[in-house]
């Protein structure tokens, strides 16, 4: 073991790189050799090169609550996260199984509700779900696909088992960082890629475009070449960089609500040559804001009349309206039961143990153990609406206690999972930092998952919160074919 890792502390966690102090896992050996072979200052120079590349490319995200300026470069850690082939194939099978079950659940919940009638999921859970859209009962979406693009967050426990932390089926973000991270790492470590047989991720834009074309409406005037657009809330949205990046990579137009108009229940895009019919809208706008004539009347982001055009089968929306019920952290609790109910299979990727405070027995346990648990609001994301009991104050414990008592349907609780750790460069030294993993699943003619995903890293020492809005960064994720 060279100088770089001489003081590296594996800790009482699953370490991605080391099976024990000084004992490197086989798939990390070549990376260790490369990093150990770096001369003085080379790591700092490569980090500076990576950072300047992100700045030049404008790779940013927005922090709404920060008064120091909203635009930020997403912190990037040079040390890659490596996933060997067998491990990846296990993850892939589990994610394919999960998205199949979620799509069957959404079709069922908007049609016969068999899963409710047979007592698998309580009826009150569905009716009280914030993002359930009863207006779409009986509505058939093209090809029966509701979640076209999904980002499911995975973590690893102390034994290295992959667990699903949550599913993001409305507007999952972050894939642009996966693609940009890869470009940067190829520039910074060109030889390492050849040595390791890292699977490519750059087909994502084409795969996404193929999927969006596949789900064009049945009455599409030009089924060989449907018109697809990406609908963004605009330049002030936190993920606008990603929206423009994906539109560019697919070669499609990026539009805001005012660029679209509905006439005779058909959606058109305004162009310099007049109106052009739109067949598929990849929307990065939540249901609430997409059509002020149907949902929020005060929305200036959406397109008046687009929901009626959608109902008439003249345009398709990806992801479908109403998918938010699958994002609900209370619904998440039931996904293993959905897999058994719809597919007749055992879950390949288990959930994290979860307590539903809407159940009296679970609520009693949670209220007695708040200081030991992670408590989450059912429909928040980005690290908001969450309490990590062991790291919170008594006042914060009490605040969440009262919130649970007032609205038990709105909260879930989980034990604190010791997320796996990965070596990261922190202030000139290599130290272990906690990570999670978000692969991206595309569900079209077939289900495909780019080999890799967004590895987020909690750069603050001891922190378990990986969200960029809460001080997290990211790493490139390498799926390698040889051990």
Image (cartoon, rainbow, N blue to C red):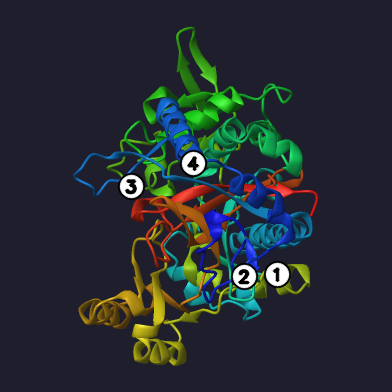
**Circles 4 and 2: CB distance less than 8 Å?**
no
Q: Nearer the viewer, mark 1 or mark 4?
A: 4
| Residue 266 picture location, percent across and down | 53, 27
Residue located beneath label 3 in the image: 296
Residue located beneath label 4 in the image: 40
Residue located beneath label 1 in the image: 339
Q: Is residue 60 above or below residue 116?
A: above
Instruction: Determine whether, in the image, residue 483 is placed left or right of residue 155.
Output: right
How crowded is the residue under tag 1: few (<14 C-alpha within 10 Å), some, or many (20+)? many
In front here: 132 or 251? 251
Q: Nearer the viewer, mark 4 or mark 3?
A: 4
CA distance separating discs 4 and 2: 50 Å
In front here: 458 or 432? 432
Residue 320 visible? The answer is no
Q: Nearer the viewer, mark 4 or mark 2?
A: 4
- Indicate which disc, 1 or 3, sits on the residue closer to the N terminus: 3
Which quadrant: the C terminus? bottom right
Q: Secondary structure at mark 4?
A: loop
CA distance separating discs 1 and 4: 52 Å
Q: Nearer the viewer, mark 1 or mark 3?
A: 1
Q: Residue furthest top?
A: 273
Residue located beneath label 2 in the image: 335
């Amino acid at each position: 073991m060279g100088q770089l890792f001489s003081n590296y502390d594996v800790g009482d966690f699953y370490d991605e790189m080391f099976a024990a102090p000084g004992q490197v896992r086989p798939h990390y050996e070549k990376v260790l050799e490369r990093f150990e072979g770096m001369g003085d200052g080379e790591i700092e120079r490569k980090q500076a090169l990576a950072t300047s590349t992100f700045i030049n490319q404008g790779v940013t995200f927005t922090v709404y609550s920060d008064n120091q300026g909203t635009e930020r470069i997403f912190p990037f850690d040079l040390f890659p996260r490596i996933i060997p082939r067998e491990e990846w194939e296990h993850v892939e099978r589990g994610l394919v199984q999960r998205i199949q079950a979620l799509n069957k659940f959404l079709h069922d919940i908007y049609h016969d509700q068999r899963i409710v009638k047979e007592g698998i999921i309580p009826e009150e859970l569905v009716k009280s779900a914030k993002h359930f859209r009863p207006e779409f009962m009986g509505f058939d979406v093209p090809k029966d696909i509701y979640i076209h693009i999904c980002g499911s967050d995975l973590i690893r426990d102390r034994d290295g088992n992959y667990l699903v932390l949550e599913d993001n089926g409305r507007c999952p973000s972050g894939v642009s960082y996966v693609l940009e991270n890869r470009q940067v790492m190829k520039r910074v470590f060109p030889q390492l890629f050849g040595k390791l047989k890292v699977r490519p991720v750059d087909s994502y834009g084409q795969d996404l475009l193929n999927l969006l074309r596949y789900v064009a409406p049945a009455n599409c005037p030009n089924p060989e070449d449907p018109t697809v657009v990406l609908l963004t809330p605009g330049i002030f949205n936190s993920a606008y960089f990603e929206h423009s990046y994906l539109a560019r990579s697919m070669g499609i137009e990026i539009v805001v609500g005012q660029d679209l108009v509905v006439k005779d229940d058909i959606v058109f895009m305004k162009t310099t040559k007049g109106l052009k019919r739109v067949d598929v809208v990849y929307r990065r706008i939540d249901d609430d804001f997409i059509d002020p004539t149907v949902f929020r009347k005060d929305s200036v982001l959406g397109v008046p009349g687009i929901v009626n055009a959608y109902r008439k089968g003249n345009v398709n929306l990806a992801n479908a309206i109403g998918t938010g019920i699958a994002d609900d952290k209370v619904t998440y609790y039931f996904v293993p039961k959905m897999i058994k109910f719809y597919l007749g299979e055992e879950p390949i990727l288990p959930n994290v143990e979860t307590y539903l405070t809407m159940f009296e027995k679970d609520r009693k346990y949670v209220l007695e153990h708040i200081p030991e648990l992670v408590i989450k609001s059912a429909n928040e994301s980005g690290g908001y609406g969450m309490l990590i009991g062991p790291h919170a104050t008594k006042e914060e414990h009490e605040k969440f206690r009262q919130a649970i008592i007032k609205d038990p349907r709105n909260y879930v609780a989980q034990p604190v999972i010791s997320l796996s750790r990965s070596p990261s460069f922190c202030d000139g030294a290599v130290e272990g930092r906690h990570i999670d993993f978000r692969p991206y699943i595309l569900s079209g003619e077939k289900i495909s998952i780019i080999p890799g995903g967004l590895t987020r890293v909690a750069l603050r020492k001891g922190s378990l919160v990986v969200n960029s809005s809460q001080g997290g960064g990211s790493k490139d994720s390498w799926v390698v074919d040889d051990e």
